[in-house]
Amino acid sequence: MSGALGWMALAALLAVPAGAALLLVGLPSYRLGAGLNVGAALLSLLASLILLWIRPDANLYLRVDDFNIYLIVLNNLVSLTTSAFSAGYIAHELESGRLTPKYLRFYHAMYQALVFAMNLAFLANNIGLLWVAIELATLATVLMVGIYRTREALEAAWKYFILGSLGIALALFGTILVYLAAQPIMGQGLPAMAWDQLLIHAHAFDPALLNLAFIFLLLGYGTKAGLVPLHAWLPDAHAEGPTPISAVLSGLLLNVALYAVLRFKMLMNANPSALAPGPLMVGLGLSSLLFAGCMFYRRGDIKRLFAYSSIEHMGIITFAFGMGGPLANFAGLLHMTMHSLTKSAIFFAVGHIAQVKGTQRISTIHGLTATHPLLGWGLVIGVVAIAGMPPFGVFMSEFLVVSSTFTRQPWLALPLVAGLLLGFGTLLWRLHAIAFGESQGTQALGPAPITALPMVTHLALVLVAGFWLPGPLVTWFQNVAALLG
Amino acid sequence: MHGLEFDIAHLLAGGMVVISLLLLYQDRLYALLKVFALHSLTLALAVGWQAHIQEAHHLYVTAGIALVFKAIVIPIALYRIVRQLGIHRTLEVVGGVGRDMLAGAALVALAILVMLPVTAGTDAVAREDLAFALAVVLLGLLLMVNRHNAVSLVIGFMSLENGLVLAAAGARGMPLAVEISVAFSVLIALIVIGIFLFRIRERFDSVDMQAMDAFRGGRRR
């Protein structure tokens, strides 16, 4: 009985966004479209909550386990709040004439298609299906990044398309190599692509083939996760697309890519003679962190600034998982959650700010806290949180990363702390100019306070997490951290 | 392994590598499209042959998809796009043939040096297919790096994907579902590309990526 309910919830998680996407294509009214978008996201969130309690057995295609269930809930939570933010955002875009109702239909359909693809990627047990889902998510976001049809948007979308597809192609080659490594041991056919079966047999795989496969997978999915030096698409795609898309790109899609890398890292760990994936991930993570820290300094575009911040945080998370061990993995999982919530809240604020000010150029945005207190202070709190100041959740997770690095690899802690401090300093310095000082430019009325609800919710969650994490969540994080090895 | 079966598989996969090298120095778009169609045709034959020797009937479907979409539909669609964009006369500046060939040969050598030792455990056909597939992938990357024109970039990408399909066909018993979805995504990708080419043309009056780069230079103060 409970198994049936579990399967229904799982089916709903995929069918609701897919059905909503089809429905939204044909829906002419944008108000109704925005409403349906929020409704579908809410239904998906409810379905994911059911899966928290009732978990169907895995089959060769789909699987719900300790690791993915929390990411699924997080995914659907953020896509719900973002869809609520998006409803207010697009109304303004429509007024200012940047988007037409026809495009909005397309936009909403793509939004649900993206949610479908991300849910599928998390639920996939089959490594081929995982790949297909990430490819689908890439194509959906490419179309949304280019939706404004300005030169900048087209350039960004084209760059994202070419680099994203290349990454995806490399990942497919890696996936094929994993199958090839599994096939002599597990025989031909579907079981040799099912992740849980692979994990059981991974110890017997040919390590050389597995190593090569992991390199391709890390480069491929690492491109999607925006790790330096594979990050070139990320700032453009964040800066030129609609802001709700920047929020889901940063908050969710990067997590999906990293999740894929982690799944394969677990396979590598299960094979004693395979290459240790840790050092590679630590290297990519550190380079992302340091590079992004240097890039904050001279960004002219506010969305681009926070896009680099996403690169920085993906670097920190990759670093933490690369270090491995219970504490660092715990910190990585926590940081993944905190970054998703905080960064999407920042993009919510930035989206409204860019609309109010009519520009994304930092040099023309000053004194926000005086003219638009809610947005200004929301941004200040968000940036303070993302920079890693107490008492927010990001501080907790960064502190855990640093302290576990100190106990295990003291030398690595040096560049890590340097990178964190660099990012911290430059971000706060940039924030000062934006939020305080003499206000300039248009004094347009801010959005209604109710539209700030998604941002406030996220920031409140991050603040609470800084003080107190619920007991079951901690146990759960610990279990998954142990699973990750 | 029968000698002849192996030789033909080898010939077809090797043929794809040679055609990938041919792609590198085509300076007219129509010629590039024709060579790409040949590339896909060879892929269809190679996959069909794999289906025959592995007695894997689902691979015939893959071969059919490669034949219909990649050797016929996509080249014709791109042919039309090129004509509508009015860029069929453009001569592309490609670096010296000698330089490209040397780089290409080095990449092929790299692919073989990487793949053969790693795959020592698997059977000979899969081994060679995989080595050639990696070579095709790397040559596709080289093509993309060398070109400025958006259409050529797309061709480079599609030839790279051909390499991936070759690799998937060489892996015995890889489930069909994956290959169909790969083909499907390529098709969607083509639609996306088509839309983009026209939009880029509309905004930049050119599909030369250098126009885009130059524009970006202007924006970053």
Image: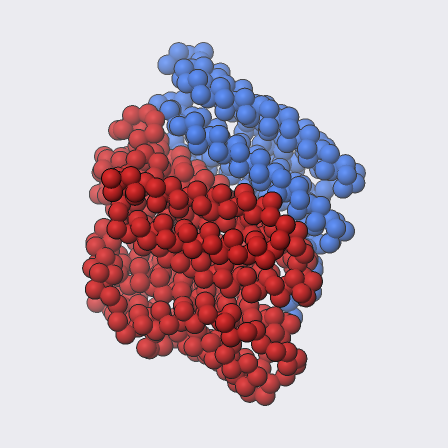
Chain colours: A red, B blue
Residue B174's place in the image compared with A455, above or below, is above
Q: Residue furthest bottom?
A: A438
List x then y, in percent, for residue A456: 43, 72
Residue A85, horizontal then vertical, whole percent: 51, 64
Residue A284: quadrant of the picture: bottom left
Q: Nearer the viewer, residue A404 or A279?
A: A404
Compared with residue A426, is residue A333 higher up or lower down, i.e. above or below? Answer: above
Taking depth in this image into account, of A279 and A248 the one nearest to the observer is A248
Dividing the picture into quadrants, the one containing residue A71 is bottom left
Picture coordinates of residue B101 (x, y %)? Answer: 59, 36
> Is B44 placed left or right of A204 in the picture?
right
- Answer above or below: position of A11 versus B37: below
Q: Is residue A383 visible?
A: yes
Does residue A47 appear to the left or right of A232 in the view shown? left
Q: Residue at horizontal 24%, vertical 54%?
A: A480
Residue appearing at x 56%, y 53% in the figure:
A33
Q: How many marks?
A: 0
> Looking at the figure, which quarter contains the N terminus of chain A?
top left
Frontmost residue, A309 versus A351: A351
Residue in the picture at 73% in, 34% down? B80
The answer to whether any part of residue A252 appears in the image is: no
Q: Position of residue A169 (x, y in %)?
A: 49, 41
Q: Dividing the picture into quarters, in which one does residue B178 lie?
A: top left
Residue shown at 66% from the left, 51% from the top:
A102
